[in-house]
Image (tube, helix red, strand yellow):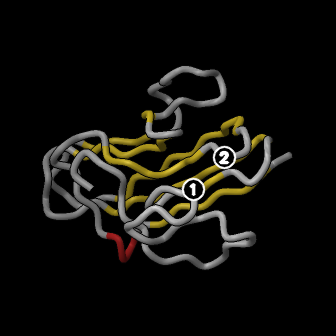
Amino acid sequence: CDGAVCVFDAERFDNGGVYNHTSETVGTISAYSFEAPADGLYFFSATISTALSDSHNSFGFMKNGVEDMNITGSQDPNYGHAHSSTTDDVFLSFSDVYYLSSGDEICVGSFHTSSDFNSAYSFWSGCRIF
């Protein structure tokens, strides 16, 4: 990812066609992003497998291109992202709840320029709570 949106180019379920798994904008949905089909409360979870023996990895959710703006409207370091400071390959897991308006977008991004991940063992998911 290296300081940008992480590439998740496969999907298992996409009812309504609200996830763009391509590198181009499709309709109104940005590359590798989920677009909320309706106003509501949404839950998202991710597990990232770090790679390439980087000494610092940091990943999290981005709402409309902004790092980790969660339901409280703050960038809370305890929710919606994870980091490691080891050269070992590790799994980083994080989750958060967001109020989204129709058309808002969520994606997974890296927040450190040397962050690398193994996409074969990384995934994220989400659902509308109400």
Q: Nearer the viewer, residue 122 or 11?
A: 11
Q: Nearer the viewer, residue 72 or 63?
A: 63
Which quadrant, please, contains the N terminus? bottom left
Q: Amino acid at mark 1?
A: Thr
Residue named by callout 1: 28
Q: Nearer the viewer, residue 19 or 60?
A: 19
Q: Residues within 10 Å of mark 2 (few under 14, many from 20)?
A: some
Residue named by callout 2: 103
Q: Is residue 31 above or below residue 101?
A: below
Secondary structure beneath dot 2 equals: loop
User: Could you tell which of marks 1 and 2 lies nearer the N-terminus?
Assistant: 1
**Direction from residue 75 to residue 55 in the image, left or right:** left
Rendering quarter of residue 31: bottom left
Q: Position of residue 25 (x, y in %)?
A: 46, 61
Q: Name the residue rendered at 48%, 44% in the picture.
A: 61
Q: Is residue 69 above or below residue 90?
A: above
Q: Residues within 10 Å of mark 1 (few under 14, many from 20)?
A: few
Q: Name the residue rendered at 69%, 48% in the picture.
A: 43
Q: Amino acid at mark 2?
A: Gly
Question: Are dots 1 and 2 in contact, CB under 8 Å?
Answer: yes
Q: Nearer the viewer, mark 1 or mark 2?
A: 1
